[in-house]
Image (cartoon, rainbow, N blue to C red):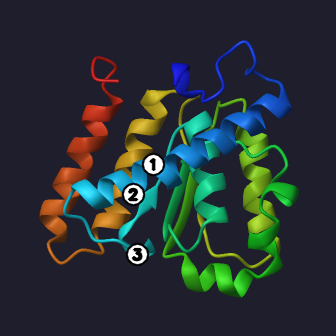
Amino acid sequence: MPGGHAVVPPESGRDPKATLRNLLAFEGDLLQDVIPFIETNYRVASGPEYRAIIGPSMGGRQSMTIGLQNPALFAWVGGMSASLPTPESTLTNLFKNPGFSNDRLKLLWFCCGTSDPLLPEVRHLDELLNEHGIRHQFHEFAGGHGWPTWRPALADFLELIFNQTPNSQKARRHAVGVASYIGDDKNF
């Protein structure tokens, strides 16, 4: 997947139809190949309460869209600089039944940098979720569209997830370590 695109550029890019094809292809890979492979080959607990999805930028759009459209698979959903250009149509099932969404999701969390050009779209999503009574957390971090903003955001998200575990101190240290490693440009 060059550059995270399931449909190879130049077909992708800013073309909305190509963006949708990419999203659907990535969703198919994740749900039909990656998750079953992990559950078959590794000793992991299955079920939405044991599964989280988060990503930055295009990966944030993918994680928010896939996570929120598949509540039977993901109870922890997040996005960093996750622009959803048409959330009213993309997330219709979420808005149709807010009570169901609130019951299924343990955490819906997203953020954006205060100087990120996607901030107006992310704020719009926050407003829509508030209007529909869907529980969520939205945070604005100082910074723009990049790892200096996403690194502390990822650490915050992971800490919220791992704080739900019995050994939260160890999990918290691990979460911050993972966020630091992932956010290090040499490792990404």
* Apparent side of residue 96 relative to residue 48 in the rendered image (left or right): right
Tell me, for residue 158, which label it has, or none: none
Q: Residues within 10 Å of mark 3 (few under 14, many from 20)?
A: some
Residue position for label 3: 49
- Which structural element holds mark 3? helix
- Distance, label 2 to label 3, CA atoms, is 16 Å
Q: Residues within 10 Å of mark 2 (few under 14, many from 20)?
A: few
Q: Residue at x 51, y 55 (%)?
A: 31
Residue position for label 1: 33
* Apparent side of residue 5 relative to residue 16 in the rendered image (left or right): left
- Image quadrant of residue 151? top left
- Which structural element holds mark 1? helix
Residue 81 visible within the image: no
- Distance, label 3 to label 1, CA atoms, is 20 Å
Q: First in sequence: mark 3 or mark 1?
A: 1
Contact (Cβ within 8 Å) of mark 2 with mark 3: no
Q: First in sequence: mark 2 or mark 3?
A: 2
Q: Residue at x 73, y 22 (%)?
A: 12
Q: Amino acid at mark 3?
A: Glu
Location of residue 51 in the rendering, given as x and y in whole percent from the top left corner:
40, 65
Contact (Cβ within 8 Å) of mark 3 with mark 1: no
Q: Amino acid at mark 2?
A: Pro
Q: On screen, 174 above or below 103?
A: above
- Which structural element holds mark 2? helix
Residue 172 visible within the image: yes
Q: Residues within 10 Å of mark 1 (few under 14, many from 20)?
A: few
Contact (Cβ within 8 Å) of mark 2 with mark 1: yes
Residue position for label 2: 36
- Image quadrant of residue 147? top left
- Distance, label 2 to label 1, CA atoms, is 6 Å
Location of residue 90 in the rendering, given as x and y in whole percent from the top left corner:
80, 55
